[in-house]
Image (cartoon, helix red, strand yellow):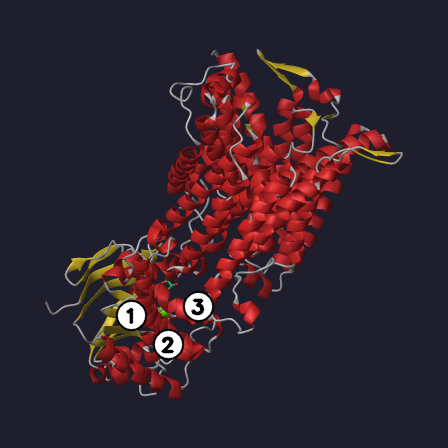
Amino acid sequence: MWNKKNLYTGISLILFIIFIYWADNNLDPYKMRILILCGIYVILALSLNLVNGFTGLFSLGTAGFMAVGAYTCALLTMSPEMKEMAFFLEPLIWPLNQIQIPFLPALIISGLVSAVIGFLIAFPVLRLKGDYLAIATLGFSEILRVVIINAQSITNGALGLKGIPKYTTVYWSWGLALLTIYLMVNLINSSYGRALRAIREDETAAQVMGINLFYHKITAFTISAFLAGIGGALQGNLIRTVDPTMYVFQLTFQILLIVVLGGIGSITGSVIAAVIITVLMEALRVVESPMTIGPLHIPGISGMRMVVFSLLLMVVILFYQQGFMGQREFSWDWLSRKGRDNEQTIGS
Amino acid sequence: MNFQLFLQNLANGISLGSLYALIAIGYTMVYGILRFINFAHGEIIMLATYFVYFGILIFSMPWWLAFIFSIILTSLLGMGIEKVAYKPLRDSPRISILISAIGVSFLIQNLSLVIFGGRPKAFCQPSIFTKMVTFGNVKITSITFITPIIAGILLYFVTYLVNNTKTGMAMRATAKDFDTAKLMGIDIDKIISLTFTLGSALAAVGGIMWGLRYPQIHPFIGTMPGLKCFIAAVVGGIGNIPGAVLGGFMLGIMEIMLVAFLPGLTGYRDAFAFVLLIIILLVRPTGILGEKIAEKV
Amino acid sequence: MNKLLEVEDISIKFGGLTAVQNFSLDLKPGEIVGLIGPNGAGKTTVFNIITGIYKPTSGKIFFKGEDITFLRPDQITKMGIARTFQNIRLFTNLPVIENVLVGQHLRLKSSWFNASFNTRSYRKEEKEMRERAFKLLEDVGLYEMRNEKAGSLPYGQQRRLEIARALATNPELVLLDEPAAGMSPQESQELMEFIREIRERFKVTIFMIEHHMRVVMGICERIKVIDHGVTIAHGTPNEIQNNDRVIEAYLGVDLNA
Ligand SMILES: Nc1ncnc2c1ncn2[C@@H]1O[C@H](COP(=O)(O)OP(=O)(O)OP(=O)(O)O)[C@@H](O)[C@H]1O
Ligand SMILES: [Mg+2]
């Protein structure tokens, strides 16, 4: 049985890789970009779900960590000439103005910088719970943004960075997304995952079972920051510009929407919802851009997408709190009608 | 920095602080009873300014009538939001209600963007609020001292209501212990509804005065004051009305002074509130006037 | 060393209320000792202090000779003290098996890295944990229920599961807070057997709070009685049954019930 499931998983994986390869050769750049974004949003949604869904810490700091990742990666991958052009108000500090490194190490460093900042932020904020934690992490995200606006000689302030090399391909985005899914599934099914869920269910009881609350929370938070940093970096090197206005609370909101829609505490749900929301986000772009249908000229309505998204969020939370998946996960047993057997759950 | 300038800034800080206090009370009252952050409070502020704008533009109301019109409409709106978005979630995990509040906030913001458009509009500026007034050698606009006066009157009114009336008693009972209050025959739904109405009315007054102070309105003006006033409420001790007032004044005065005395940090003005929040939460998580509640195991 | 736990003169105040005053206790390995007293006497508070949830206002606690007074609850559990709660606190949305597995987490050797990459060494450890959990569930008669949500079990089984979860931490001392609460005479009889069995099989010392006098008198070798936070009696079940102060504190309660 177990081997059969592995076989199914392997076959699906191969089919998916073939699909990616096919897409890379056949889809137009616009569609490709959406596909790449899907992979990035999968990573971001899993990052948020790890703390919000599995550990029960309501954090709203994703946008801040994405900003850290995106700026770090941009500064590490841009050529010295591009940097000199971008930083015309105030030159970039040494040694950042000289450095240019390949994408992979830049990505890893971006994740690590974001993780370090996440770790430092976690020290004070993880003493808080519930709404307080939410507002404090949101606050930190805002502070990071304000710092970015003001640190002219590192971030180029409000001007942002332009001309970031477009390194993010579909292989990067989905390769890392698949790796993240794989690691997350393992982690959540492991003893550490159980400890996190125990913390979510009842902190006091978990602590009395010998679980060091702070250590587990801070590790989950740091991993989450790492992933958000990677996601931000991938996004920056896809759209090729970053500026402080990109990393407002609305960005966190979109990722929160994915997590809630997919089911708070479900990896499968996050993956499905990430794809749906990303596609929807692009599809609805039509509504916001001006249209001409025959003689009728409709000006673009900005804000319409977010109206749809906030309505969606409210409908889910009011009428369908479980989202797509609740806390359940996909399993091949669904197909074999064997019923659910919790001994082997996620993705096996 | 001379003394005169200091007084000028102090007056400014008190004025801004009283505005924050007014809005913070709405947060604190709602948090006191339902234990959640009404994320949409900032959007209520924003809508109040638009109601004034349209009252004058479409119905050609005189400004004072537009103000009253806006306060009434905003109160009803606050009540409506509670009924639609929060009431069905009262027995759900607290996180659900917070998410719903975030949803409402974004919905109102973007719906306003769709309906009103993103271009800033000019808020009315009746001359009695813009006159320059001189106290000794300190020169300020009249709104600067009208704000604290109105805020003071309203604060007195609210404090009286909460402390000395039957309704206020029911509010406090509900805040103390939801279930017991219910058992004692208090109509919880009514009390909650009233709390939202009252909080929104205060937010409307705050919003209008915000508009008079910063007379450019657009769909996103509510966000920052909303967040800052929540922080003021937490700093003072959430759930505690005098605390919200204290927090509001502290934040307002400190913010103005920061900009006045350390102009180099002006860019960090909006981050200051969050820094204060985090310091307070670490040093005294219950806020300055809040009481500690130990969890019973 | 023949003292497992030494509680020396602990007191705790909540505002003006002294919930526990100068409470002392020695436990020897393998004993079953009871703690009784009227409602609100401070029994649960004593447990909360021993397990580190509350810090005492004064006094000290030693476990196996080490001072544990100011350790965190998880550190204390790691040293070998496990407990159950008066109002059952299972992880209700997690399956029965996971509740027991969580209890073993504190002895986990693998790192986050090994767990995330599901390495061979992690798989081995996970397998051992599961085997131990199965064994434990068999011992307490919940093996058949292993995949049910903990919250969906009937009350009596939830109590048993909570004990199993405590045992999963591999303790030397188990604190049981009213394990027979809400049970029928028949069920509490079974529970007594169960507790005796646990002591034999897991070689643990048991310190329990209990209101069912039949249970307390039936299995405890020594009993402590507190009232309003003050220790009023201490002795064998027989001595306690005939102690005037105890009878006074329990006025109206028939100790032979
Ligand atoms: N965290 C706390 N804050 C304030 N008072 C507390 C706290 N925990 C316990 N108390 C008080 O301490 C006293 C003792 O409580 P405790 O729960 O220990 O009683 P008990 O003997 O276990 O009673 P029962 O038989 O009802 O379980 C009670 O008056 C209780 O209200
Ligand atoms: Mg008790």
Instruction: State which chain disc 3 sits on.
Output: A
Instruction: State which chain disc 1 sits on.
Output: C
Residue that numbered label 3 is attached to: A2
Question: Residue at (48%, 13%) from the top-left corner?
Answer: B3
Residue A316 location (% of width, % of height): 64, 55
Residue C236, by quadrant, is bottom left
Which label's residue is closer to the chain start, 1 or 2? 2
Q: How far apart are labels 1 and 3 at the CA level? A: 40 Å
Is A98 above or below relative to A328?
above
In the rendered image, the residue lying farthest to the right is A295
Is B30 above or below relative to A266?
above
Q: Identify the amino acid type marked 3.
A: Trp
Residue that numbered label 1 is attached to: C175
Question: Residue at (63%, 38%) from the top-left corner?
Answer: B42
> In the image, which disc is placed on residue A118?
none
- Marks 1 and 2 on same chain: yes
Residue that numbered label 2 is attached to: C160
| Structural crowding at the residue carrying mark 1, measured as other residues with C-alpha within 10 Å and reported as few (<14), some (14–19) or many (≥20) | many
Residue B248, by quadrant, is top right
